[in-house]
Image (tube, rainbow, N blue to C red):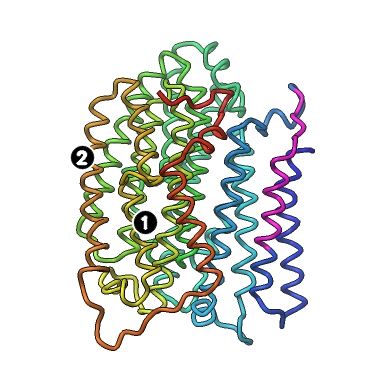
Amino acid sequence: MNPLFLEFSVVFLGLCLLMIEAFASHLNKKILAYSAVVGLGIVLLLSFLPMQAFAVGSPSAGFYATDALAFFFKRFMLVMTMIMILMSVDFIPVIERFVPGERRGAGVGEFFILPLFACAGLMWLVSAIDFIMLFVSLELMTVVLYILVAYLRKNTMSLEAGTKYLILSALATGFLVFGITWIFGITGTTSITLLASTIATLPSSALLPLLFGIAFVLVAFCFKIAAFPFQFWLPDVYQGAPTPVTAYLSVASKAAGFVILLRLLEQLYVIPILHHKLLAVTTLLAVMTLLFGNLAALPQTNMKRLLAYSSIAHAGYILMAVASLGSLLAVPAIGFYLVAYLAMTSLAFLVLMIVSEASGGDEIYRFQGLHERSPLLAGAMVIAILSLAGLPLSAGFFGKFFIFQVALQQHHYGLVGVGSIAVVAGFYYYLKVIRVMYWQQPAEGVASISISGTAKFLMVFLIATILILGVYPTPLLGALKIHGMPLILR
């Protein structure tokens, strides 16, 4: 099977559902959501079939990677998109309240369908090995997210978040294009896989302008992964965006950013004159991102903003492994961490969405006495929070364990020290959520919270993923044979 069939199938599915939504206006919108999930599930199954590798020298091989890294993260994007759409089923009342229309349910169907096109862009992005392909697939994903972030048009916070995301993301795109222009002007190629061999033939006088172009590209990537100091957009966008979109931004967009960053650094790290400079930059980014994310999360009283700063902190942990790419375990460790992050972050946002809709806000105090109002929601949030903090017997623990193992193998003891301080700080702001849920009584007149069957299914699936990976990570580690190098526990 041609591997491009996967992305084309997702786009075709989205177009078909758009036509159905347009001509069957009275159709129950939940059918569109479940159809999208089933369609993505079929594409996910197809991704495990033998794929036809592009011949070396063919046009497709020059811009589209068919390696293990690409297929692993294609499946990652498919799963995250399915989770986001299932979360959106319980978000229908909010969409109906804040999206104006002539008929009830206007805008609901499109909210389920648009993520399919973002998913296709993300799948192309993780296979992009040419700057032009990278730019086009990145823009496809980003344009869809512009719409989704500002989707609640009668909600001023959503409009503000959409405006900020649009302006700052456009700025990052400008940095990316400017950097690509410099790199192309110096090397004469837009191929990422040819960078190492091309740069090796350049005269020393070309090094400074080349570094200038690389710096602009790294700025754009740092914006996508929310690394310090390019994280300033994140808290406001996360707080104002619809909660399922916030979860999607937090996981899928961040993972894609790290994949393209890995592909670029993989080529640049092999050049001795660039290796030490880039190593110093990524190490500094990791340290500052860890410190800022955790320290800024400490005083937060809004749950969405707390998870936003937590997302910055987790980007810092992954950057620890990026700074340690000399280890054969670095890329598998990043892959495992992102899968764990998908499960625990999606679960936290799912619980937050349900509690927020029932209580009328995202503040932490609205979780007061949640164990009495809904033991399942409280228990699910405890598992998500403890995994985010890195408690043993959770996926988050092994994620941090592998990251620290990689950093120690590369003798980055200072980085490990900063990471250890960040873990301790994380326990403080994560555990205060548990204190509110179990040690404070609910306000008078607050009713118990009902949970839909879809939300229960998704919750159980995410809880099981966190716990299974926390006690038996071997199957996932076996799947993480990136570049033909299996992760071997030592």
The one of 127 and 339 positioned closer to us in this rendering: 339
The picture quadrant where one finds residue 118 is bottom right
**In the rendered view of the protein, which quadrant contains the N terminus?**
top right
Q: Is residue 37 magenta?
A: yes
Magenta span of residues = 36-55
**In the rendered view of the protein, which quadrant contains the C terminus?**
top left
- Say if mark 1 contacts mark 2, CB within 8 Å: no
For mark 2, what is the residue? Answer: 421
The one of 338 and 103 positioned closer to us in this rendering: 338
The picture quadrant where one finds residue 281 is top left
On the question of residue 170 being in view, the answer is no
In the image, residue 189 sits, relative to residue 44, either above or below, namely above
For mark 1, what is the residue? Answer: 383
For the residue marked with disc 2, what is the amino acid?
Ile
The one of 266 and 306 positioned closer to us in this rendering: 306
Is 323 on the left-hand or right-hand side of 190?
A: left
Q: In percent of the image, x 22 and y 77: which residue is there?
A: 441
Q: In percent of the image, x 60 and y 83: which residue is there?
A: 101
